[in-house]
Amino acid sequence: MEVIFIKDLKNQGKKGQIKEVKDGYAENFLIKNGYAVKKTKENLSKLNHEIAKKEKETEEKTAEATKVKETLSQLVLEFKVKTGEGDKVFGSISQKQIKEELEKKGYKIDKNQIDITNPISSLGFHNVEINLFNDITATIKVHVIK
């Protein structure tokens, strides 16, 4: 019997995959537990509709992320910090601080999207990468001043 997986099942199939399995296994486990449905014209059309919908959403998110990337790459965030002897900065600039500053400027960025490779703990300009969507990454400049 051919089935269409509607949920991921480890070592068996991924969501949207069509696979040939034994009738008993399909009826008594996959379909009964909601992992798969029988392959019919109706179920195939639902699957194709879902795939088309996801592709459209992905295209829209990619276009939006590209627009945001262009505006973010021109952005410079300034942080005023306290310094000690020899202009040594107390602490460092965190993801949370960058997120809050971006929110003030009207960007909705999750702190997990902000990638700080080296701690920002010195005066001057630093590059920070923001993972917007899939492979779209924007680089913003963070200017630390005293």
Image (spheres, helix red, strand yellow):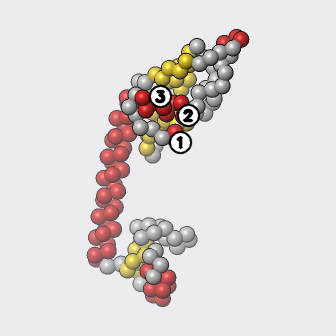
Mark 3 sits on what residue? 101
CA distance separating discs 3 and 2: 10 Å
Label 2 amino acid?
Answer: Gln
The quadrant holding residue 88 is top right
Against 108, is 53 above or below?
below
Residue sitting at x 58%, y 31%: 94
Mark 2 sits on what residue? 95
- Reading the chain from its start, which is encountered first: label 1 or label 2? 2
Q: Is residue 62 left or right of residue 84?
A: left
CA distance separating discs 3 and 1: 15 Å
- The numbered mark at residue 112 is 1
Instruction: For the residues labelled 1 and 2, say whether their Cβ atoms are less than 8 Å apart.
Output: yes
x%, y% of residue 144? 56, 19
Residue sitting at x 33%, y 48%: 59
- Reading the chain from its start, which is encountered first: label 3 or label 1? 3
- Tell me, yes or no, if residue 120 can be seen here: yes
| Helix, strand or loop at mark 1 | helix
Label 1 amino acid?
Answer: Asn
Residue sitting at x 53%, y 21%: 79
x%, y% of residue 68? 37, 34
Instruction: For the residues labelled 3 and 1, say whether their Cβ atoms are less than 8 Å apart.
Output: no
Residue 126 or residue 100, whichever sits in front = 100
Residue sitting at x 70%, y 11%: 86
- Tell me, yes or no, if residue 17 can be seen here: no
CA distance separating discs 1 and 2: 8 Å
